[in-house]
Amino acid sequence: MKRWIVIMIGAVAAGAVHAADIPAVLHWVQRVAVSPRVSGIVQTVTVQVGDRVKKGGVLLTLERRTYQARVAESAARVARYQAEAKEAARHYRRIKNLYDRTVISTSALDLATMRNDRARARLDEASARLALDRQNLLDAVLRAPFDALVVACYAQPGESVVVDLRPQPVMVLARSGEMAARFMLGVHRISRLTVGQAVTVMVGGRRYFGKIQTLGLEPVAEKKGPRYPAAAVFAAAGTLRAGMPAVVKLP
């Protein structure tokens, strides 16, 4: 009986050696700066800092009259070239039929073929332009790329947004519903962990259940010796902010 008690005490002591509370800092799991794909004047801003928005939700709308006019113009051009291409194809078939019956010369067939090819090329070009103008009209509305929390907003109605080689960010978004707790570990402790391993994260006295997301491979030099960066992700409820202190309870 005493032997079993000694074994149990030893097992508990061994578990205590491995368990640890590691100080950590909260970070966003994903943070992106977003901007419209087209230039224009900001018409409406539909969100503000702290708002949560679903994937595809509208963040900002640019003035769209210019893009709508371009779509209408391109659509009219496509309609005109469709009629021309239809007539050119009809003419080609008529000439080809006459040529097959040896009624007309090769040069007449060549001219009909050239006319038909040019009409089809103009129609293809106009259709491509219409598709681009329609996409630009859609891009005049900036939408959330994922379920997000609005971290920063730099745009105001009436402001000009210019898209060039480096588009200016109009908002900063963070993925909502998840947070990451980042912390540092010594080589002996990190070697006992695996990616995906369950951990507990404490924030402000509240307990969250998460898992190890990353375990660093390169050390950061510190006075106490090399330490490795690691991160645990967890489902976040309520309002948590990047930079808040946390504690990661390792097994």
Image (cartoon, grey):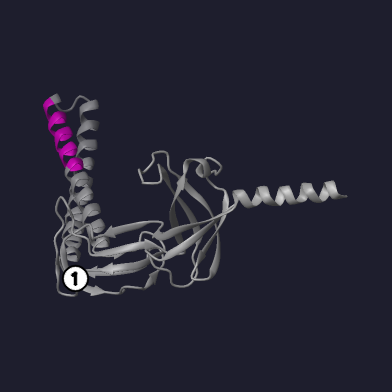
Q: Which residue is the site of mark 1?
A: 42
Where residue 17 appears, x then y in whole percent? 61, 49
Magenta residues?
Answer: 107-121
**61 sits left or right of 224 in the view:** left
Q: Residue at x 19, y 70 (%)?
A: 42
Where residue 206 appears, x then y in whole percent? 54, 70
Quadrant location of residue 59?
bottom left
Is residue 10 or residue 76 the one in the foreground? 10
Q: Residue at x 81, y 51 (%)?
A: 5
Q: Residue at x 23, y 41 (%)?
A: 89
Q: Amino acid at mark 1?
A: Val
Give SS at disc 1: strand
Where residue 154 appears, x then y in whole percent? 21, 69
Quadrant location of residue 105?
top left
Q: Residue at x 19, y 75 (%)?
A: 157
Q: Is residue 119 magenta?
A: yes
